[in-house]
Image (cartoon, helix red, strand yellow):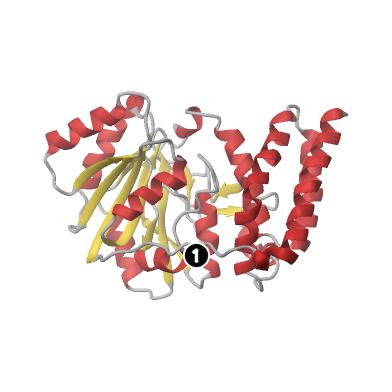
Amino acid sequence: MISKIAYLLISVSLLGLILIGNIFAKFLPSKRDEGIKGDFEKGLTSIIMLNYNGEEIMHIIMKGIEAILSQSYPKLELIVVDDHSEDQSLRLLRELSEKLGDGRMRVVSSEKRRGVAGARNIGLREAKGEFIAFIDSDAIPERDWIENLVNRLKSNIDHGACVPKLVFLTCPNLINGFGAAINRLGYGVPIGANKEENGFRYPKEVMYGAGCGILVKREVFRKIGLFDEGFLFYGQDDSDLGVRMRDAGYKIFVVPESRVFHKSFHSNTQFDANFWNNRNTIRFVLKHYSMQDLIRWYRWKWREFLLIEHKTPQIKCWLSNFWEIPSILRFRRENTGLGSFLDRYERFMREI
């Protein structure tokens, strides 16, 4: 009973502050992300790979780097961002880079733990490409991964990004995902996950692309800004980027000819990924849902809370978001007039 009362008090208080804050948000100082800056090299693709404590999967990382540097697409650079690892993986990556002697690869490191969004932004600020790809450290792309995606982006002005077919590294006949969509509770759900690859009818367009394998036009980051570092450590940074991209008028398409093998669950075992994903889901909903959407969503969220066994982590997820109120309100102020998120993205939600 105490946990239910605590949950109600904290969650309703946060929702109330968002409701009241919508009225007074115009008085908050502007803090708009200016996006990616600097000159770029036409035709170049910058590939950003993150590493955090990857020593135990270094054999996969090495295969992934080898596959990237062997891509059929000739103009590329590989930026490996180490997110302040505590094991020997940064040293091993630097030794590998020196051994390979390939000027297209460089390793950069963060002075502190930044999480997925922050580490990707480090890579973005280093990137010189007209196109920017992201790949996880536990993924190995096929040789024409980049070439297929770039060809699609070059030939379609309205495309902001393209996503490949992700299949499981240990079971390559099973799909890991063709992009993803948000369900009504705000959680990201991969399209086609665990389905047989043969015979699956892939979607042509998706709500957003997972951070592994996606290729994005540089101009997108110039227009909508970088990854939102308010999504701490793990979860929803890619869905937030995709929704902001689509709301800015860009489309995200699937290129099934482009394929990436993905171990998939490595990052989930490194830290409390479930907590951060739940915490960031609340932030995503508070950021993007209209007030009517929030009322509907909260009813669903309350039913979910009643069903779960361990309730304290859910309460902490809400508490963690109190610090995010100013940035959430700034975003809501600058993106008024979009209407209901649930109505706007209903067609994608039906696919999961």
Residue toward you, 231 or 235: 231
Residue toward you, 190 or 40: 40
Q: Position of residue 84 (x, y in %)?
A: 37, 33
Give the residue type at disc 1: Met
Q: How many marks?
A: 1
Indicate left or right for 179 with 286 as reference.
left
Q: Secondary structure under badge 1? A: helix
Q: Residues within 10 Å of mark 1 (few under 14, many from 20)?
A: many
- Above or below, 171 relative to 291: above
- Above or below, 350 relative to 26: above
Name the residue at 35% across, 29% down. 54
Q: Position of residue 166 (x, y in %)?
A: 42, 47
Indicate left or right for 312 with 213 as reference.
right
Q: Quadrant of residue 315?
A: top right
Residue identifier under label 1: 245
Name the residue at 50% across, 52% down. 238
> Is residue 297 something one can see in this rendering?
no
Name the residue at 59% across, 34% down. 274
> Is residue 33 something one can see in this rendering?
yes
Q: Quadrant of residue 262?
A: top left
Residue toward you, 188 or 334: 334
Q: Position of residue 91 (x, y in %)?
A: 25, 28
- Above or below, 227 relative to 225: above
Indicate left or right for 9 with 207 as reference.
right
Indicate left or right for 28 with 103 as reference.
right
Name the residue at 25% across, 34% down. 62
Residue toward you, 65 or 223: 223
Residue extending furthest toward the right: 1
Q: Position of residue 1 (x, y in %)?
A: 88, 29
